[in-house]
Amino acid sequence: MSGRPAGGGTGRAIVDGRAVPLARAHLAITDDGAVRGDGAFETIGVWSGLPFRLEDHLRRLRGSLASLGLPPPDTGAIAAEVDALLVGLGPRDATLRVYATAGGTRVVALVDQPQRREPGHLVPLPGPWIRPLDAGYGPAGAKSMSYAPNMAATRAAQAAGGDDALLVASEGWVLEGPTFAVLWVAGGVLRAPDVGLGVVDSISRRTLMRLAAVAGHPTEEGRWTLDELGRADEVMVCSAVRDVIAVGRVGEHRFGGRTPVRDRLAEALEGERRRHAHR
C-alpha cells in the first residue's frame, strides 16, 4: 500500500493500494466500471469504529464477481485496506464502500453514513431485471455496479408521491427495494422473499431472520404476492447502513398502529452491531 490514509476521519479512500482523499478517488474513463457499470460493489456498515460482518460482505463480493464472469477480488488486500482506513476513526459510525471493476480497479472508501428519506411509503414498481437464480441468467442476485434501474425506480416512486419503490417480479412476487431488503409479519411469522427469486442476499435481512429465530419467533422465506403482503400486520425494511424501519404504506395497502416485532428486531440488531464492534 502506498502510504497511509491522511487524517483519521471519513472522506478517505484507497485506490489500487494508493491512499487518496475521497475527492481524488477516480475511475479512469477507459475502465468499464465507469463506462458500463461493469463490476460489483459492497456497502458495509461501520459501527463504533469497526465493520459489521466484513467477511460476509467480502464473500458476497466474490460471489457477485463470479456471477458476472469477472476475476475474484483480492480479499486479503481489501481487508488490509479496510483496517488502514479505520485507523484513527475512533468509536464512530461510518460506511465503507468497496468497488471491484471489470477494468481491474479496486476502490475502498470510508464515508459518512448517508442521510436518506425513510421509506415509510413504498410504491410497487416492476423489477424485470431481477430474475430467479434458476432462470439461467448468470448475474441473478449479483450486487452489480449497474444500478441505474434501481435508482430510476426510486425516482419514479418519489415522482408518484412515495418515499421509495418496492420492486415486484414479472410473475407478481414481492422482491426488494432498490437499496434495501423488505420483511413483514403475517400470522405471527416473520417473512422475507426467497433469495432464489434473484434478490440480493441481504446480510442485514439474514441477520434479522437469525435474531428472530434465536428469540423464538417463527420465520419463513418464500414467494408472496402484493395482495398477500397487504394482509401483513407489520412491514419493515433494512440495509447495511439503516436501522430496521417500519413501513406504513405499500401501494394502496396501509399498515398502522404498534410494531412490536420491528421494535424488538431493531433493538436486537442494534445490540448485535455494537457487540460485534466490541469483540
Image (cartoon, grey):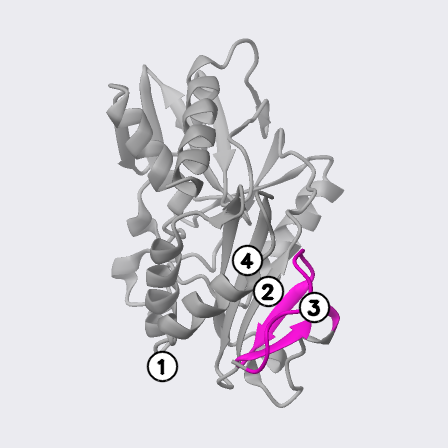
- The residue at which mark 2 appears reads as 109
- At horizontal 40% and vertical 35% (from top left) the residue drawn is 275
Towards the viewer: 93 or 222: 93
179 relative to 225 in the view: left or right: right
Give the numbered dot on residue 86. Answer: 4
Residue 215: image quadrant is: top left
Q: Amino acid at mark 2?
A: Ala
Q: Amino acid at mark 4?
A: Leu
The residue most toward the top is 257
Specify the quadrant that holds the C terminus: top left
Q: Position of residue 43 (x, y in %)?
A: 51, 55
Can see residue 228? yes
- The residue at which mark 3 appears reads as 22
Give yes or no for residue 47 being in the magenta stretch: no
Look at the picture and state if 118 lies above or below 151.
above
- At horizontal 44% and vertical 37% (from top left) the residue drawn is 273
Of pointers 1 and 4, the one earlier in the residue sequence: 1
Circle 3 residues within 10 Å: few <14, some 14–19, many ≥20: some
Q: Position of residue 18 (x, y in %)?
A: 58, 80
Of pointers 2 and 1, the one earlier in the residue sequence: 1
- At horizontal 34% and vertical 68% (from top left) the residue drawn is 62
The residues colored magenta run: 2-23
Of pointers 3 and 4, the one earlier in the residue sequence: 3
Give the numbered dot on residue 71. Answer: 1
